[in-house]
Amino acid sequence: MMLFTGYKSRKELKENIGKKLVYRETSMFGPEYVSTGTFVGAHRPLVTGLPGREFFAEVTMENDLIVKVK
């Protein structure tokens, strides 16, 4: 699974550990977000329209909160 994040950098994503994830679903077949688990998050400026550079990160969630970013 992969979601588009609403963060301009991996550093900004890491700064939000302990908070809810800002994201945009990428699948037309239904929601991919899970409140507890690990998935790949990406920032793709050309697709999302947000400033910043493209990056990918492994995000671990627990009870709707970000607990780890690699």
Image (cartoon, rainbow, N blue to C red):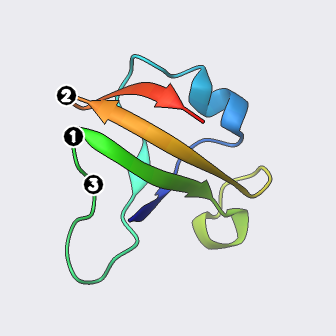
Q: Are marks 1 and 3 in contact (CB under 8 Å)?
A: yes
Spatial CA distance of label 2 from label 3 is 12 Å
Quarter of the rendering occupied by the C terminus: top right
Q: Position of residue 20 (x, y in %)?
A: 34, 29
Q: Is residue 32 visible?
A: yes
Q: Are marks 1 and 2 in contact (CB under 8 Å)?
A: yes
Q: Residue at x 59, y 64 (%)?
A: 48
Q: Is residue 59 above or below residue 20?
A: below
- Apparent side of residue 53 relative to residue 12 in the rendered image (left or right): right
Q: Position of residue 26 (x, y in %)?
A: 40, 71
Q: Position of residue 53 (x, y in %)?
A: 80, 53
Q: Amino acid at mark 3?
A: Tyr
Q: Is residue 57 above or below residue 12?
A: below
* Label 3: which secondary element: loop
Q: Residue at x 40, y 16 (%)?
A: 18
The answer to which image quadrant residue 54 occupies is bottom right
Q: Nearer the viewer, residue 60 or 11?
A: 60
The residue wearing badge 1 is: 35
The residue wearing badge 3 is: 33
Q: Position of residue 31 (x, y in %)?
A: 22, 66
The residue wearing badge 2 is: 63
Q: Residues within 10 Å of mark 2 (few under 14, many from 20)?
A: few
Q: Is residue 62 above or below residue 32?
A: above
Spatial CA distance of label 1 from label 3 is 7 Å
Q: Are marks 2 and 3 in contact (CB under 8 Å)?
A: no
- Outermost residue, right direction? 53
Q: Nearer the viewer, residue 47 or 68?
A: 68
| Marks 1 and 2, the one that precedes in the sequence | 1
Q: Residues within 10 Å of mark 3 (few under 14, many from 20)?
A: many
- Apparent side of residue 69 relative to residue 44 in the rendered image (left or right): left
Q: Amino acid at mark 2?
A: Asn
